[in-house]
Amino acid sequence: MLRQSIERYTAEHYTFEGRWAALKSPRAYSEQAWSDYGHFGWLALRLPQESGGVAAGVRTTAPLMEAVGARLLLEPILASAIVGTGLILRRASADQKAQLLPKLADGTLKVAFAHQETLNAFSEDAISSEYRGGAVHGSKVAVLHADCANRLIVSARKRDVGGTVSLYIVDAVARGLRRQRFRLLDGRGAANLSFDGVEAEPLNASGAIDADQAAIAAALEEAIVASCSEALGAIRALNAATNQYLKSRKQFGRPIGANQALQHRMVEMHLLEQEVRALTLAAQRALSELEVGRTRIISGARAFTCSAARRIAAEAVQMHGGIGVSDELDVSHYYRRLMVLGTLFGNRECHFGRFAATCEAIGH
Amino acid sequence: MLRQSIERYTAEHYTFEGRWAALKSPRAYSEQAWSDYGHFGWLALRLPQESGGVAAGVRTTAPLMEAVGARLLLEPILASAIVGTGLILRRASADQKAQLLPKLADGTLKVAFAHQETLNAFSEDAISSEYRGGAVHGSKVAVLHADCANRLIVSARKRDVGGTVSLYIVDAVARGLRRQRFRLLDGRGAANLSFDGVEAEPLNASGAIDADQAAIAAALEEAIVASCSEALGAIRALNAATNQYLKSRKQFGRPIGANQALQHRMVEMHLLEQEVRALTLAAQRALSELEVGRTRIISGARAFTCSAARRIAAEAVQMHGGIGVSDELDVSHYYRRLMVLGTLFGNRECHFGRFAATCEAIGH
Amino acid sequence: MSLEQWQRAERLRVEIQEFCRSGMPSDILRKSSRHLMLNKDEYVRWMRALQSRGWAVGHWPREHGGLDWSALERFVFEDELARAGCPWVIPFGVKYVGPVIYTFGTEPQKRRFLPPIAATDQWWAQGYSEPGAGSDLAALRTAAELHGDHYIVNGQKCWTTYAQWADWMFCLVRTARDERVQNGISFLLIDLRSPGVTIRPVRTMDLCHHVNEVWLDNVRVPVENRVGEEGAGWKLAKFLLANERTYGAGVGEAWFALARLKTLAADMSCGGARLISNSGFHRRIDELELRVVALEALSYQALADMMSGAESSAEASMLKLRASEVYQDLIETTVDALGYAGIAYDPGTLHGEGPPPLGPDDAGGILRYHLYNRAATIYGGSSEIQRNIIAKSALGLQP
Amino acid sequence: MSLEQWQRAERLRVEIQEFCRSGMPSDILRKSSRHLMLNKDEYVRWMRALQSRGWAVGHWPREHGGLDWSALERFVFEDELARAGCPWVIPFGVKYVGPVIYTFGTEPQKRRFLPPIAATDQWWAQGYSEPGAGSDLAALRTAAELHGDHYIVNGQKCWTTYAQWADWMFCLVRTARDERVQNGISFLLIDLRSPGVTIRPVRTMDLCHHVNEVWLDNVRVPVENRVGEEGAGWKLAKFLLANERTYGAGVGEAWFALARLKTLAADMSCGGARLISNSGFHRRIDELELRVVALEALSYQALADMMSGAESSAEASMLKLRASEVYQDLIETTVDALGYAGIAYDPGTLHGEGPPPLGPDDAGGILRYHLYNRAATIYGGSSEIQRNIIAKSALGLQP
């Protein structure tokens, strides 16, 4: 149901040709589409029923994330509706929720999760930002959609309780906050943030002292699984485009797809896509079923997806030839989207390492 | 000149069909061929002119080693005429040489180098055999052609000079020496050796205290370069066989080599062969020219050759289909020869590690 | 798949694990888990041990003596046996020809052949490949001419596994010439004790005797030993192929090999340390583990798709490709871990008598299986053929 | 190669190293070594700096103003410049069309065109590819019809590098229809200021403007601007292609990229340590270094074979394949080393004004070059075409 309505909407209103206006606009996304998503309830999927949602797990939001990849959507769905919303649902107090959730549901509020502090994508980032005297000090880099977010959820060490990493909510135009906006390689907005004593409100649901830390871990796991779905959507669309090109492009008097060497390479891409699909579904199950070894499956899926995506993207460009390198065709946009997905929330090496750490036990 | 005469002789007298008798004989090699090699002077190449040789470096012996690979020769050329002879030339006294060299030249003496002590092929082996009271104590494993050698050159720690590794010569039928003979995967003979106080004579040319140690390092480097040549010969012959098969084997009404996927894979094998050739030649130059960074080039060539050989051998079997797996065709014999070459004198990981250790300096 | 199906399969899994621990003849498990060569008697005992619980034909319908297993149960059965290092479930009777007979055979054929197949009272061989017909099976030339109530069969089959032990061979033969080469092929059951049958052993590169050439020289085959109509052989062969492709064994074998690779890497020494602490080698093992995880996920996904009716014809090809690729790399890496023991080879020690020249007990078996297993990407439809199938059926690419 | 050739080349190597240290315009080197976009003026200054020593046309014969370089000297020239991070030696004039003109041109053509080419007083573009004629160049459709002493040219060229700066374009056009499509192609020199020429920029995925579509609408080209006979264009194109393929640059570029990758891995932090101490990443770098060593050995071997007259026509294809593959992997790994700086992109900073949004000075340039360099396995004969060439010429395999 959800899948069909997303596919129908994006096929009509988010074509590659129509997307140029959004891509080139200063905001780097379509306000109209964003407001439509809110209208259709897609931004509220994760919210409880009393807030107009369906209390969906990340598994249920998979069709949405697949569409983000397949249609190269530019709006802050992952940043706000998946990750930011997830943190608020886990750690905001009832009052905070009452204030934030309705606006998240209709899209008038966009949140971004300001967490990463260094350029390192090879392992989990250590947090050195601090919260003291009611304000955040520190800096964050490459925060997805922090360019357009109204509020930021910031991770920082709480000085007075032994430096536990906790979560704070900050107004995006607060005093002392500098935002250096830029585009990611795939055209989506991001920002580097510098906090010079920025007034911040703790997300203050009751909970254990490390509840925020646990919520961050959970939100990052959800982000990883969601980005696997996004990659799956992009891979599927890209493979379909390449396969179609093999049939339509003629050189030496016949379709280039009649060449067995290209056929066998396309078969390999198809196989990788099927493996990414199987692992992504397994990772979704691992999330929602609280299975033992969730890190193993989630980081394993992610590591596999990163390398598969890289290979598929490179092969798609190569098999398209010159046109594959141009900015005019969608192929190079998928290439860049998949590059971005290969780094956000930790790269292949990062997740392969996490996976490998679960392999120590002999046997299985 | 040498290359042509070796090629002519082996093409006539060492065909794959004719080789079966030698392979299945208890000695696991052809006595006739061995005596012919002696007669032609091929076993004396490295000897000084006064001993009937041409004082050849390993570079000059390359055509011989290529033939060992190309024709899958079974005789102890590498063990005796290259490595064993090299050690004697470096470390035997004039008297010892006078006694040994003439017999090495005509093939009546075969020597093997007993050095490896553990199964480990991933790094250089530590020597724990000992020489004390005029006798060797210890054990050696998988010594190439120790099954048929008359004399063994043994590395052992000299107890009275602080455990320096030195070289000793031992009669292969001496008391206290147990030889467990077996075949390597490629049909060549080998033996595990156990020395229980075996009378041994030091190789006693004068020299620094670590002269034997240096001679061992040099002999192993020569062995590595020689085995690159052997692998090159095998790779070249195997690629030629596969390419020929692609042209002659018909399925679905045309040669299987008309399939572009197989063509492109064959091209990759050809390219790897050219790279192996270029690196093997570079390694030969590195040996004889005492260049800086010889380990870098030699171990680099070896590491590259190991992985290229593995891929080429696997592809040769695969492209031949069922017949490639049979013992009746030469293809599987090349496969097994290349497996053996991938382990003797250190495997890919061992030499890649040695290469990598030279990469530390930034830039080049 | 339904919860009930899942629970049934999990119950079966527990039973099989229990069987592997205590029901399984231990002398056979000792050999198979070391990749040593089993003899005919051992294989027969093994198959009968399985059939003592009805498992050898668990995938057959109840009316023919089976247990009506779901695809999931069949998967679990193969998976668990392979994980435990059990021998190969000899497929020629119970997996290949049995289903052909109960699906396409006459009642007398069913009565005559199915019981001895289920009980492994007959050993079957598969007569498909010929010297000129490997990947291009339809090019087969073995001819059967009808003379009264007998076919007279002439030709040569090759790569016939265990024909040296076989009582019967099911066989594709040409009964007519036709424009379309797939037509005119028929499916015969040939008694290998018939006059005119000659079986010549062919050594593979592990120096063992698995496969044979089978020469058929004016062999008389009663017409009632043809299964299906004359000319329907290609259809039966495709049915058999589809049946052949179940991939529990591939997943289980991979886990078994990975576990052995890990113990070996932990046992072997590498310059003063354990091999597992060599970071490059450790990485290779972990990369392999990720591929096994992916293979398992892909297999279960294919199973789920199959059980929900959404199976694509390309899935079996995909699983065969991936399972054979990852296994080849696993066993090759295991051979690497053996170091110098990975190049010493004495085929005389592969039947269970005496240790290999070097290394652990199973060094010879590992090496043997590595060598023989190079054929895994060749038999049952080579990897190249599988890719062609996927290109055509899943991607719509035409040559 | 002879000792004298070797020594001459080594002397040149030293001179070039000296030039890179002190003769080279430092503002240009600063940009090129960061993979930033040079403008036309910078490229022209660069080419003229080279030509101030005669090097831009060092490979030309002395009679046409060159230095009669050996293949080895030419290799060393490209190798050393690339190792130092110098810009691309713009090939269209000095490397591509120049040799065609002095080999096949008339005396007036030589007098008219060679001096401004050598001096970079003219900027040239290459008009080969068309929308329907990429790998299959012979399918080109741009047509030139002779009307008196002029050709009237109509058609469309694409992927025309730096046409936006060019004064002239050498161009393959169809002057006749023939059974064999390679026949009937001619080689024209077209003044791009002619009426009817339209140049449309095409952005590549680095969001920069390198390439163009060139539309030719009834463009009049004097017949004296045809090089060689009418219909001889294919021969000239093949000559040009053979000349195009010299591979010093590939080796030098690889060493430059590897050195930068190493400094970057030593600079970037990775969870409390330096990135270089991540064993998986360190291994990737070392594996790349081994491939660069192999590329260098293969290149020198090809050079030695060429200079001893034993060159195979497949060698150029092999070197192009390997050089482009290893470079793509080097620069991709460098992007990986940048971490989050490898996904932040501001094309506005690629011309030398201001730092990239994140990371070191050259982060944007590295990323840009990674993206643009995906085309390296496509232009100048795609990798697929190179493999076809090798299959045919070195292996004798026919489609």
Image (spheres, coloured by chain):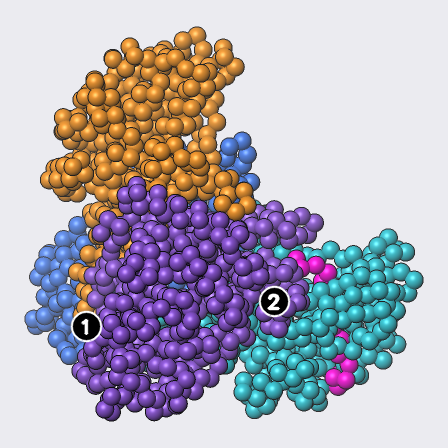
Chain colours: A orange, B cyan, C purple, D blue
Q: Residue at x 32, y 74 (%)?
A: C112
Q: Which residue is mark 2?
A: C352
Q: Residue at x 72, y 75 (%)?
A: B147
Please state the extent of the stretch shown in magenta in the rendering.
Answer: B105-121
Please name the predominant secondary structure of the magenta segment in the image: loop
Query: Which marked residue is nearer to the observer: mark 2 or mark 1?
Result: 2
Give SS at disc 2: loop
Can residue C338 be found in the magenta stretch? no
In the displayed structure image, the side of residue B201 where residue D344 appears, left or right: left
Q: What's the mark number on residue D185?
A: 1
Q: Residue at x 29, y 23 (%)?
A: A85
Q: Chain of mark 2?
A: C
Q: Chain of mark 1?
A: D
Which amino acid does the dot numbered 2 rest on?
Gly
Q: As displayed, is residue B259 above or below residue C222?
A: above
Rendering coords of residue C111 (x, y %): 30, 71
In the displayed structure image, the side of residue B85 where residue D378 appears, left or right: left
Q: CA distance from mark 2 to mark 1?
A: 73 Å
Give SS at disc 1: strand
Rendering coords of residue D372 (x, y %): 32, 49
Q: What's the mark number on residue C270?
A: none
What residue occupies the far right of the structure in this picture?
Answer: B133
